Every structure is written in structure tokens, then in C-alpha cells.
């Protein structure tokens, strides 16, 4: 998978904005402390002490106009040392944790700062008003760290760590979540990537004008669909159905998501669900012979269960549905299988195999393919194929101009 142009532009804009604001945000963070300790009243009765006062004093000195970077770092270190001593002296004093967190942030140690901020609120929930905005600013600091790692050093491992931390600091930071997932996927780290993309699929659909949101959802669909296929190949069928259903929910016209779900349902012997989903597959791919056979089996096995229950009327109905599916499948003029999509810029090539069926060899058949994303159709084209002899095979290629990289397809026979 290649990073798309729009996403790179979004990443560049986001991280440059973060870079420009970083120093100002750190200043605002430190301004939360004045010449006195934070004005927070803890229900526990905790108050600052000598170490906290000393730490606050060092933090205040970082605000001296014209102070050089080495001197400022020195004051942050002094503040951290004093607050750390205060924690050693009294492990339950939230003021020392809060000041240590601010100092760690100033020393560009966001993970350490986050841990200290969490402990602050744990000891004194009343500190939340101070900690929440400070953690959000830490999230922006982690975004800048990720930007530097990726753009300046091409260090995707460090960049992923920065984005992951940013999401921990600010759960609303969808930029960080997406990029952590995307670059983890490129590195083959599905354990980190797939939960991110599955979360994206549960979000409300983006507006059509939100090009980045639309693009991210499409990337998520392709990633989660691939993961569902891997689970099926590993015989983890129940998990595969769950994952593939999350794709079907946002991309109902995705043939592969529906068809792979039927294969997993068949192995799970979930006949009612199999009948429902397979009926959708044959709508999307009316020359999918295997789907008709799966539909036959779903109705037949349901009929067998009804027979055991003594429900003769519904048993008969299900057997009729089974025979109808089998008859339709066997009467197909040709079978179309192994359909794949190969994207290349503004064109996606549909490749597939035509297998000879009921039509006489040489019979012309016209197929109209529709390429789609969850937002709708992105390209359509027709291909003329010639029916091979019974059970013989022939390949076809169909280049389709597209307005976006498709996530799925469906087709129909044009008469």
C-alpha cells in the first residue's frame, strides 16, 4: 500500500502547524504556574511543601525573557530534581507530581510527563482542570516529535511511538491514531494497526467534503478487509466473521467482504446467516457459481434441521430454495471467479477468470463492472468476454478510470 498524496499533504500541514506552535504552547504550559503554587484545593487536604515551592520557583525562572536554551533546560532540570525529591519524601503529595510533570514536559520527556500527570489526578482529582489541557499540549508535543522522526530522520519506529503517545495523551487526536496505524501497517505490525482502523470504521461517516476523512476510511476498509482474509486463512473463522462484518457495515457493496464472510460462515455451519449473506453476494456478482452452491447448502442444511424438528412445511420451503439456487448456478452461461483489483494512479484494472458454463463456446457476454468505496461509485466500465468451452478458462483484464482508489466492486450482465 502506498501513502496517498492527500494524506501526506495533511500530515505535512498538521506537523508544520504543531512545530510552529510548540514553543508558544510550552510557554502557556509553564504559565499555569505563577510565583505561587497551583491554586488547587484537594479533598485529601494535601498541600505543597518546601520541595514543591522550590520546584515552582525553578519553573518560574524558565520564563525569564531572553533566557538561552541551555539555561532554560537547566531550570527545568532543577525543577524536576526538586519535585522528585518531594515525591521521595511524600509519595502521596500531588503537587510534587504535577510540578515534576511540567518539568519533564519542558525537558521533552512527554511519556514521563504523562505518567506523572496521571498520578497527580489519581491522588487529587481536583487537579483535572490543570492536567487535562496540559496533557493535550503534551499530545501536540508528541506529534512534533513524530514529525521530526519521520521527516528529518526517516525513523518510522520513533514516529509511531510519538503518534501512539499522542493518542494516549489525547484520545480525540485522530491524526495521531491514523498515522500510528498506517505506518504500523506498512511495517507489518497488524497488532498495532488493525485496532486503529477498526475504530475508524465505527466512527460516523465523514462528510463528502472531508477528503482526508474519506481517504482514511477507505484505507481502513482495505486494511481491515485484508485482516479478515488473513483470519479466515488461519482458520479463525468466528473472528474473521466479526472483522469482515465491520467492513460490510460501512461498505455493503464490497463483494470480497461479503463473499469471504460466507466462506467463514460455511465453516462455522451458521446456515441462516450464510443464506442471508450469500443472497447478497449473488446480487453483487451474479456469475459467482460458488456463491450459488453455498446458498444451496445453506438452505439444504436448514431444511435438514427443520426435518429433525418435524416442521414439514418450512422444510419443504427450504428444500425448494436449495434446488432453486442449485438450478440457477448450473444454468449460468459462464462463471466469473478470481476477480482482483489492481490500482495504478487514476486507473484500476479489474482482472478475472471466465469459466465455461451453460453457454455455447464463442457466445459473447458483456459484463459491466462498478468499482466502489463506502462513499459510492468511483468508476465503471464494460468488458466483452467470449464464453469458453464447458469448464475451460479464459482470463480478462479491464482498465477502469477511477476518481478514487476503490475498496470493492460489483458487476452485472448486460443483455
Image: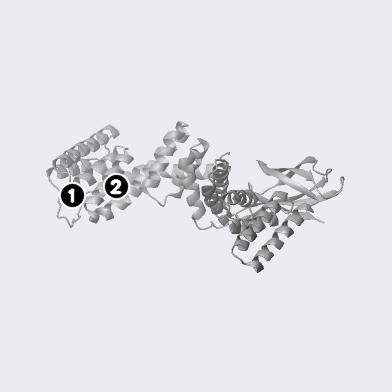
Question: Front-most of 93 and 83?
Answer: 93
Q: In this view, does 27 lie to the left or right of 379?
A: left
Image spot of residue 142 (x, y percent):
38, 41
**Is residue 248 shown above or below 229?**
below
Q: Quadrant of residue 322?
A: bottom right
Which element is circle 1 on? loop
Q: In the image, 57: left or right of 286?
A: left
Quadrant containing the N terminus is top right
- Identify the element where label 2 is drawn: helix
The single residue placed furthest to the bottom in the displayed view is 313
Q: Is residue 21 visible?
A: no
Q: In this view, does 392 lie to the left or right of 112?
A: right
Residue at point 63% right, 62% down? Answer: 307
Residue indicated by mark 2: 29
Give how far apart the Cα atoms at labels 1 and 2 are: 14 Å
Q: Residues within 10 Å of mark 1 (few under 14, many from 20)?
A: some
User: Considering depth in this image, is 173 or 222 the residue closer to the camera?
Assistant: 222
Q: Which colour scheme is used?
A: one colour
For residue 288, side relative to residue 200 (left or right)? right
Q: What residue is shown with label 1?
A: 37
Q: Residue at x 22, y 53 (%)?
A: 124
Amino acid at each position: 500500500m502506498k501513502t496517498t498524496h492527500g494524506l501526506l499533504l495533511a500530515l505535512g500541514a498538521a506537523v508544520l502547524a504543531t512545530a510552529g506552535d510548540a514553543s508558544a504552547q510550552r510557554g502557556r504550559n509553564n504559565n499555569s504556574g505563577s510565583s505561587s503554587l497551583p491554586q488547587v484545593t484537594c479533598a485529601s487536604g494535601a498541600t505543597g511543601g518546601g520541595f514543591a515551592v522550590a520546584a515552582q520557583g525553578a519553573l518560574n525562572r524558565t520564563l525569564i525573557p531572553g533566557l538561552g536554551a541551555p539555561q532554560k533546560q537547566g531550570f527545568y532540570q532543577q525543577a524536576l530534581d526538586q519535585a522528585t525529591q518531594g515525591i521521595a519524601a511524600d509519595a502521596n503529595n500531588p503537587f510534587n507530581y504535577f510540578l515534576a510533570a511540567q518539568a519533564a514536559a519542558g525537558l521533552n520527556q512527554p511519556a514521563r510527563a504523562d505518567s506523572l500527570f496521571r498520578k497527580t489526578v489519581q491522588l487529587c482529582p481536583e487537579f483535572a482542570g490543570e492536567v487535562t489541557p496540559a496533557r493535550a499540549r503534551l499530545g501536540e508535543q508528541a506529534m512534533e516529535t513524530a514529525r521530526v522522526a519521520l521527516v528529518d530522520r526517516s525513523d518510522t519506529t520513533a514516529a509511531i511511538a510519538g503518534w501512539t503517545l499522542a493518542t494516549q495523551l489525547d484520545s480525540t487526536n485522530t491524526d495521531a491514531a491514523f498515522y500510528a496505524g498506517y505506518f504500523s501497517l506498512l511495517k507489518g505490525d497488524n497488532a498495532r494497526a488493525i485496532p486503529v482502523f477498526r475504530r475508524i470504521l465505527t466512527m460516523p461517516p465523514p462528510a463528502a467534503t472531508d477528503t482526508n476523512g474519506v481517504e482514511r476510511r477507505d484505507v481502513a476498509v482495505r486494511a481491515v478487509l485484508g485482516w479478515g482474509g488473513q483470519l479466515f486463512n488461519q482458520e479463525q473463522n468466528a473472528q474473521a466473521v466479526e472483522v469482515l462484518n465491520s467492513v460490510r457495515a460501512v461498505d455493503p457493496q464490497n463483494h470480497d467482504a461479503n463473499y469471504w464472510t460466507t466462506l467463514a460462515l460455511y465453516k462455522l455451519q451458521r446456515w441462516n446467516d450464510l443464506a442471508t449473506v450469500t443472497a447478497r453476494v449473488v446480487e453483487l456478482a451474479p456469475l459467482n457459481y460458488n456463491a450459488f452452491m453455498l446458498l444451496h447448502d445453506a438452505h439444504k442444511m436448514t431444511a435438514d434441521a427443520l426435518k429433525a424438528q418435524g416442521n414439514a412445511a418450512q422444510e419443504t420451503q427450504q428444500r425448494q430454495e436449495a434446488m432453486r439456487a442449485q438450478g440457477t448456478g448450473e444454468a449460468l452461461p459462464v462463471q466469473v471467479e478470481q476477480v482482483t483489483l489492481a490500482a495504478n494512479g487514476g486507473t484500476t484494472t479489474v482482472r478475472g477468470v471466465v469459466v465455461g458454463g451453460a453457454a455455447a463456446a464463442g457466445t459473447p457476454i458483456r459484463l459491466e463492472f462498478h468499482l466502489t468505496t463506502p462513499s459510492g461509485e468511483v468508476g465503471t466500465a464494460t468488458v466483452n468476454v467470449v464464453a469458453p468451452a464447458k469448464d475451460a478458462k479464459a482470463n480478462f483484464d479491464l482498465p477502469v478510470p477511477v476518481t478514487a482508489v476503490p475498496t470493492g466492486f460489483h458487476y452485472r450482465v448486460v443483455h
